[in-house]
């Protein structure tokens, strides 16, 4: 009998219910927090864990956590909706079909070459700025390209979001992951970059090779072009594609230089959709209808992000997140150095399920692990690397990562199809990460 997971919405509701049960079973506990001027964030105080009054969530409190999760993820949800609307407008102009025809013609006979190119591009985004939710903007383009080249949707997700996650996990410069972790650890930013860069190149090579192998073995008949959208002049279609290209250029500049967040990006893509609809000949009425169709198509993916965020809301309000962290890290102090480092990787992977934010994960765990690593004689660089591997790679598989569940939903993919692709390579990369940690210890990396 073929293995099949429940519907993603059922899976997430089950996770929310399990999190609520944990608030009744686990003892409540919390660490003290302090404002850290170096990171600009609230970090835990090592050795301050204490039991507090329990706050188990009732059935109704658990239900209320769902809209709270949606409110917490509001900026991302609105971003997904507006991106979906904007690209539906672009698609209705027929411009995307023209672009895909040109790409497929260019890649004729060499379609597999697109995978390393796309993977390296998105891995660079992940390594530089922890790109994940932003990739949802590329879903319409990616899925259309995959269909035209004869690849399954899972290949498009692997080459884009998967590559970005791997790039983030081993990055020497990601400010939201290794950057914050190094600040908390008292290490200079970019220190140890050469070792991390070599590790990143090796890990990304393995990921790309796995993606190409999977794409080759699961290839289907390529979809031919069609005549979707109104028949408009080539000049109009070029104007539409120019507006799309300009939007992505502004996205890169805005995120890297102007500290844009999802609110600014949402406004940008709304403007892109309006311009594309007008210059593409849809008119105000057609543009509005395109946005409505896009909202309808992305509503499911957007809601999944809110449900995923609700899992953390439940455990945080139930005061059991710190309890789990304390229970996982305390036993590591009794292990030999190498075993302790490997144990950190596993503990980070488990903790990242209820704490899916890499930056939130760093300020929660690193202040506890740095004193422990000093006590054990373990390099702080190794401690940071163990965090990167455990938390970063967990992003590939955890259902609490809203970007993953939303991308899967937007691509029309089943969660078990993604797991069938990613589970073996996830295990391989975790073992690789553990080997790199052991190597770092052996060479005395500081």
Image: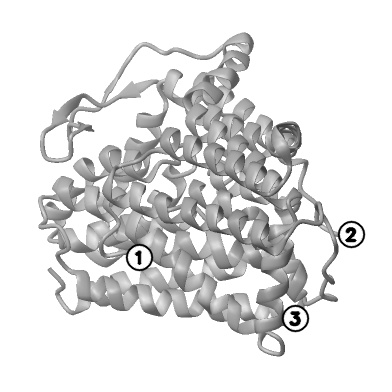
SS at mark 2? loop
Q: Is residue 52 above or below residue 124?
A: above
383 relative position to 240: left or right: left
Of pointers 2 and 1, the one earlier in the residue sequence: 2
Q: Residues within 10 Å of mark 3 (few under 14, many from 20)?
A: few
Q: Quadrant of the N terminus?
A: bottom right
* Mark carried by residue 170: 1
> In terms of image quadrants, where is residue 298?
top right
Residue at x 34% of width, y 23% of height: 29
Q: Nearer the viewer, residue 138 or 153?
A: 138
Residue lying at 52% horizontally and 19% vertically, measured from the top left: 68
Query: Where residue 243 sits: x, y (%)?
Result: 54, 52
Please state which of residues 77 and 319 is positioned toward the viewer in this rendering: 77
Badge 3 marks a residue whose secondary structure is helix
Mark positioned earlier in the residue sequence (1 or 3)? 1
Q: Is residue 124 above or below residue 82?
A: below
For disc 3, the marked residue is 217
Percent position (x, y) of residue 202?
40, 79
Residue placed at 39% from the left, 20% from the top? 28
In depth, the one of 238 and 340 nearer the eye is 238
Q: Which residue is mark 2?
A: 1
Query: Residue at point 82% right, 75% down?
Result: 222
Res 287 visible: no
First in sequence, mark 3 or 2: give its number: 2
């Amino acid at each position: 009998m073929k293995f099949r997971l429940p519907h993603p919405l059922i899976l997430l509701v089950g996770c929310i219910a399990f999190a609520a049960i944990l608030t009744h079973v686990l003892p409540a506990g919390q660490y003290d927090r302090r404002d850290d001027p170096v990171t600009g964030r609230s970090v835990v105080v090592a050795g301050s864990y204490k039991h507090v009054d329990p706050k188990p969530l009732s059935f109704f409190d658990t239900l209320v956590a769902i809209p709270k999760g949606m409110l917490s993820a509001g900026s991302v949800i609105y971003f997904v909706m507006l991106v979906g609307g904007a690209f539906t407008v672009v698609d209705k102009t027929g411009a995307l079909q023209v672009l895909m025809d040109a790409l497929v013609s260019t890649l004729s006979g060499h379609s597999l070459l697109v995978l390393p190119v796309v993977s390296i591009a998105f891995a660079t985004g992940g390594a530089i700025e922890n790109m994940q939710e932003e990739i949802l903007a590329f879903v319409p383009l990616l899925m259309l390209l995959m269909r035209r080249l004869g690849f399954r949707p899972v290949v498009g997700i692997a080459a884009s979001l998967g590559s970005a996650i791997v790039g983030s996990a081993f990055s020497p410069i990601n400010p939201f992951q290794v950057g914050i972790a190094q600040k908390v650890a008292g290490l200079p930013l970019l220190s140890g970059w050469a070792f991390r860069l070599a590790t990143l190149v090796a890990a990304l090579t393995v990921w790309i090779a796995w993606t190409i192998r999977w794409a080759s073995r699961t290839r289907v008949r390529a979809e031919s072009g069609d005549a979707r959208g109104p028949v408009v002049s080539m000049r109009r279609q070029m104007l539409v594609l120019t507006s799309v290209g300009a939007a992505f250029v502004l996205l890169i500049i805005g995120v890297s230089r102007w500290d844009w967040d999802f609110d600014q990006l949402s406004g940008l893509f709304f403007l892109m959709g309006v311009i594309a609809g007008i210059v593409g000949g849809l008119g105000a009425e057609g543009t509005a209808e395109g946005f409505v169709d896009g909202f309808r198509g992305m509503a499911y993916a957007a809601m999944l992000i809110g449900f995923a965020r609700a899992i953390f809301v439940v455990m945080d309000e139930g005061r059991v997140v710190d309890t789990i962290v304390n229970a996982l890290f305390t036993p590591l102090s009794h292990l030999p150095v190498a075993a302790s480092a490997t144990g950190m990787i596993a503990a980070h992977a488990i903790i990242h399920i209820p704490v899916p934010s890499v930056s939130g994960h760093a300020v929660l765990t690193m202040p506890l692990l740095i004193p422990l690593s000093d006590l054990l004689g373990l390099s702080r660089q190794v401690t940071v690397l163990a965090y990167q591997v455990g938390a970063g790679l967990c992003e590939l598989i955890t259902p609490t990562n809203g970007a993953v569940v939303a991308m899967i939903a937007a691509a029309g993919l089943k969660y078990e199809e993604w797991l069938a692709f990613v589970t073996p390579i996830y295990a391989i990369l975790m073992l690789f990460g553990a080997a790199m940690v052991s190597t770092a210890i052996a060479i005395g990396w500081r």
